[in-house]
Amino acid sequence: MGELFNFNVITDNFTYFMIGRFPNGPLGGLGLTIYLAVVSCILSFFCGLVLGLLSLVRNPFISYPVNLFINIVRGLPLLMVIFWMYFLLPALMGRTVPESQTVIMGLTLFTSAYMSQIVRAGIVGIPKGQTEAAISTGLKHWQVMLYIVLPQGLRNMIPSFVNQFVSLIKDTSLAFIVGVSELTQVATQVNNRTMAYPTEIFIFIAILYFFLCYAFTSLSRWLERRLAWRKAI
Amino acid sequence: MLTYQFDWSIVTSGKYFEWLVSGCKVTLQISIVGIVLAFIVGLLIAVMRMSNFRPARWFALAYLEFFRNTPLLVQIFFWYFGSYKILPAAVNDWLNSTNFEFAAAVIALTIYTSAFIAEDIRSGVLSIPKEQMEAARSAGFSFLRSMQYIILPQAVRITVPPLVNQFLNLAKNSSLAMTIGVMELTYQARQVESYTFKGFEAFTAATVVYLALSSIITALVHLYDKRVLNPNRAV
C-alpha cells in the first residue's frame, strides 16, 4: 500500500485544502464550501418561505405563476441554473458579478424552490381544526398563519431543512464549473499541479465532504426522533 | 444588453441544432443505461440492507451513507481521474479501450443513484406488512425466495413513482458529466454558446428539453398514481 498510495500530497497541501490562500488571500477550500453553503442556506430559507406561502395563496393570479416558477426550477439541473445566472446576472445588473456571488444566487434560486415544497408540506400538514379554531377566536387570516400555523409547521420542517442543507453542501461542489476555488476546485488545482495522486486527492475530499454531510444527516435524524417524541406527549 | 439580437434560427436548424440533438441523445443514453444499472445495484443493496447476515447489512449501510453524503461531482472526478489505482489492470484496459468519459460518468451516476434507489426500495418493502414475510417463511420459502416471490413484486409496484423520479434526477444529474468531457446536452449548449455567443438561445433550447422531459415524467407518475395505485379513489 505504501508504494501504491502516497498521502504526502494531502499533508503538504493541508491548509490549502482547508482555507485556500486565507488569510493572505481570498478564502478557499473547505472554508469557502461551508461559507457558500451557509449563506445560500440562509437566503434560500427566506426565499423558500415566501415562495411556499405564496404558492398556497387562494388568489390564482399569485399562486399559479409562483407554482409555475417553482416547477420550472425543479425541472432543471442545478448546473443549468448556475449557467443561467452566470450570463443573465451581468446582463440584468449591468456590471460584472463575482463568480462566488453568481454561485450563491444560483444555489439560492435552486434551493429555495425545494425549500418552498418543504414549507408547503409543513403548512398543509397542520390539521385544519387549528386554522378553524384560530379564525373562530377572531384572528385574521395572516395572524392565523403567523401565530398559529407557522410556529407549529416550521418546527416539523426542521429535519427537512437540515437535509436540504446537506444537499446544499454537496451542491456547492458545482461552483467548480465557474471557477470558484471551493473544495472541489482546490482539489482539481492540486491534482493538476501534482499530476500523480488523483486517487489520494479525490478520496480525501470525498471523506471530508462525507464527514461534514454525515454530521448534519445524523443531526437531522436525531431532531426527527426528538421532535416526534415531544409531539407525542 | 438592449442591443442583443436574438437569432433563434441557430438552435432550430443547421449545425448547432444537430449538436444539441446529439447532446439530447447522449443525455438519454446515459440516463437509460444508468437507471437500469442503478436499479439492479440498488435492489441488491436494499436486499443486503434488510438481510439478517450482519456483514452484508453493514456493507450496505456503509455504501448507502457514504455515497449519499458525498457530492456527485467528486464521485465523477474520482472515477474519471483516480479509479485507475484501485481497479485491476484488466478492468483498466477494458475501460481505456471503450469511451472512458462515458463509462466513468455512467459508473458514478449508477453508484450515486443506486444508493437513493436502495432507500426507496427499502421504504417500499417496509410498507408491506411484515405478516407477509412471516407467512412466506412459514410456508417454507427462504429469506431470499420470500423476497423474490412475495415481498419485492408488491414493493416494486409501490416503488415505481419514486423510481421514475430517480430516473428524472439521474437525467438532470447527468449534466455533471460535461465536466469530464461527455458531450451531453448541457455540454453541447455550452459549446453552441462559445462558438456563436448566442448563449441565451442555446441555454433556452437546453432548458426547454429538460423541462419537457421532467413534465412528461411528472405527468406519467401522476397518471400511474391515479390509475394503478389508487384506481378507486373518489378524487
Image (cartoon, coloured by chain):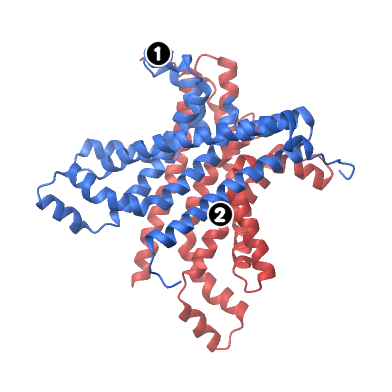
Residue B133 visible in image: yes
Residue that extends furthest to the front in the rendered view of this protein: B13
Label 2 in the same subunit as label 1: yes
Chain hosting mark 1: A
Q: Quadrant of the N terminus of chain A?
A: top left
Taking the spot 47% from the left edge, 72% from the top edge, the residue there is: A126
Residue A81 visible in image: no
Write down which chain is painted blue: B
Task: Say few, some or many: other residues with alpha carbon within 10 Å of mark 1 (under 14 / 14 to 19 / 20 or more).
Answer: few
The dot on residue A114 is 2
The dot on residue A4 is 1
Query: Label 1's element?
Result: loop
Write down which chain is painted red: A
What's under tag 2, amino acid-wise? Tyr
Residue that extends furthest to the top in the rendered view of this protein: A3
Compared to residue A25, the image places residue B115 above or below, namely below
What's under tag 1, amino acid-wise? Leu
Query: Label 2's element?
Result: helix
Residue A200 is situated, as x and y percent measured from the top left of the image, at 46, 22
Front position among marks 2 and 1: 2
Location of residue B18 (image quadrant)? top right
